[in-house]
Amino acid sequence: MAPPRERAARALNRDAVLETGLADPAWLKARREEAWDLYVATPLPSTRSEEWRYTDVGRLLPLDGLEPNLEGAGGAPDGDLVPGVGGPSRGTVPDGLLRTMAHDPASSGRVVDVDGHVVSVELDAALAAQGVVLCSLREAARSGDPVVEELLATRAVPASEGKFPALNAALWTDGVFLRVPKGVRLDEPIRLSRWVSRPGTATFTRILIVAEEFSQVSFVDEITSPDFESTTLANTAVELFSRGGAQVQYVSLQRMGRGGFYLATQRTLAERDSTLDTLNVALGGSVGRVDLNARLLGPGANSDMLGLYFGDEDQHFDFNTSQDHVAPDAHSDLLYKGALDGSARGVFRGIIRVHEGAQRTDAYQTNRNLILSDDAVATSLPNLEIGADDVRCSHGATVGQLDAESLFYLMSRGLDREQAERLVVLGFLGEVLDRLPLGGVTEKVTRAIRAKLRHLHG
Amino acid sequence: MNDRPILSVTGLSARVADEDPDILKGVNLAIRPGEIHAIMGPNGSGKSTLAKVISGHPGYEATAGAVVYQGEDLLEMEPDERAQAGVFIAFQYPVAIPGVSIANFLRTALQARLEDGEELDLFEFQELLMERMELLQMDPSFVQRSLNDGFSGGEKKRNEILQMAVLNPTLAVMDETDSGLDIDALKVVAHGVNALKAENPAMSVLLITHYQRMLNYITPDVVHVMVKGRIVESGGPEVALGLEEQGYEKYRRAQVA
């Protein structure tokens, strides 16, 4: 028998699950262990399955070699953080993240997360007084908030959802819990600024947002990192609940460095007369995969689902979306637009499912791709599954190149070819941002796109 | 004014790229600084092909002859180089570019003229834009709209002239700018062109038109008649008036003969 080793490098295993959950309440420990069992029992998605056909996760993601970013690892802070106290400061927040945050305009609140650990939480005092809760998810789970126990990894993104949701439910270290009480409306977005610093690690984050009746909130989830030599995973589970008449906007800005592997499962549950809009922006990382399921659970519910991706070099973005119309008289409208340069790959797979009885559904789905180089590839697979007879549904997909007439027109005014291309690409992608004007998001994304466009065909 | 032509077209034949036959069949034309020339002709005579060839449109190619602009071989220049050198074409059918606002586009175009490292003064640009829109009786919100996206025919034409007014060319080619404009819009556009001309008397203009009516408001120095790819007559404004009365029939017959 081999001698017992000194504390080995952590890996994605049961020990890590137990260690992560050490200070958790019993229900959460149990949930983690169940999730781990599910993870072990669930085969890794292969390219033989329809949903993973174009993303060979077994080849792209060396799960066995990843080290989980557990609490206390790699300089992440130990100890408790008191919600609402202490802003981000030099020392606890890396410079790269501070630079990103410097471009943010006003916020109603902000959370900073480094390597899967919340390092600061700020919330407008007036909102806190109105009962808005914004805190580290870990703190929320430990504090015994019944809403967290009821909704965490149960109705929206449970472990049973798949291999990666199970892994996340077992190993999540922290994240955000946001609850907006009935009728409370936030003027400015809540911003989550995430930073991943350690190459070769796996970070597991969860976001749980509950907007009570007739409340209104927008949430911007931005993740950035340096470039990594080795594959570095950021796995995120996003659970969004809008109660009757509430309005919620969730924006994900994925701006990781190269080597980053972004894997997100998002589910939105929109109840009667509520609005639950999402925007997924993928600009960074080497691989980005987002599984988004919007469920329209009550009449009058509405979800605008927007996506924007711009890949260059060998970036690979894969979006798997579904619009589930469970209730009648609901509306969903999806628009995903992508530009692909270099040898980048874009995959969009979307399905509208109109459930039996969901009469008078209005559901739309559009995916448009702009190919900027000979080696870039876009795959677009829109789909419909209609179980009711009185519905209005449409889907459409295009993959096209830059229009020669447009480029000529701009060049005839003195722009050189690259300036003309940049303008057309920016205009093409900008349509998505125009649909969801949210404090600072358009400017920030436009700036990031411009920076990428400077290296067009590079 | 000096006598050296700013644009000289000699023996120019041209066609749609890779498609026989030639549409232009040996065009000769010389425009001097400050002159306004009009080219009139029936549909299909090759007027717009000439504008496209001068603009450098990749869908057209010269098969013979030369186009010299300010002493340089224009046909060897890229479309953007032509624009940078002061050539402007107001297109007959300008293309729509969603998501690119007129203001952003014009700012980029002016910035493109500056040396590397030089920055356009945004305040001055805004002033210029506002002043030009006033000249053309346009609503200030117009420039926030996407380029030609959902524009009416008249809006597209005005947008072309707005660009011309902002970019202040040395040679402006107006390709059937009058078509699709009602008489009030035509007057506004013509007034704008005249005002630009008054500001910059050295600007040369080549007006391409099917009808005489534009020439009631912009007085040409020279009028050319183009039929079947050739200029068949050149003269003063009286040539246009003659066309108004008699049409193109006599030129057609002359060619057949």
Image (tube, rainbow, N blue to C red):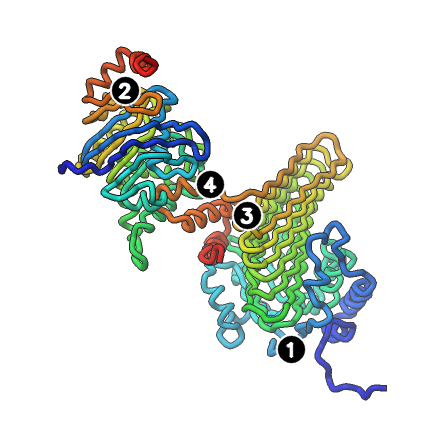
The chain carrying label 1 is: A
Please, what is the three-letter code of the amino acid marked with disc 3? Ile
* Residue nearest the observer in this picture, A190 or B8: B8
Chain label for disc 4: A
As drawn, the residue found furthest toward the left would be: B1
Q: CA–CA distance between discs 1 and 3?
A: 42 Å
The structure residue drawn at horizontal position 41% and vertical position 48%, both measured from the top left corner, is A417
The kind of residue on which mark 1 rests is Ala
**Disc nearest the viewer among 4 and 2:** 4
How far from the left and from the top, in percent, is residue B40? 29, 22
- Name the mark on residue B213: 2
Give the structural element (helix, strand or loop) at label 4: helix
SS assignment at label 1: helix
For disc 4, the marked residue is A404
Q: Give the crowd class for mark 2: few <14, some 14-19, many >=20 residues within 10 Å.
A: some
- Quadrant hosting residue A333: top right
Q: CA distance from mark 1 to mark 4?
A: 53 Å
Have a look at marks 1 and 3 and say if they share a chain. yes
**Label 3, on which residue?**
A371
Residue type at mark 4 is Ala
Query: Alpha carbon of mark 2 to alpha carbon of mark 3: how far?
Result: 45 Å
In this rendering, which labeled residue sits more in front, label 2 or label 1?
Answer: 2
Q: Provide residue A240's location: percent of width, then percent of height.
A: 66, 53
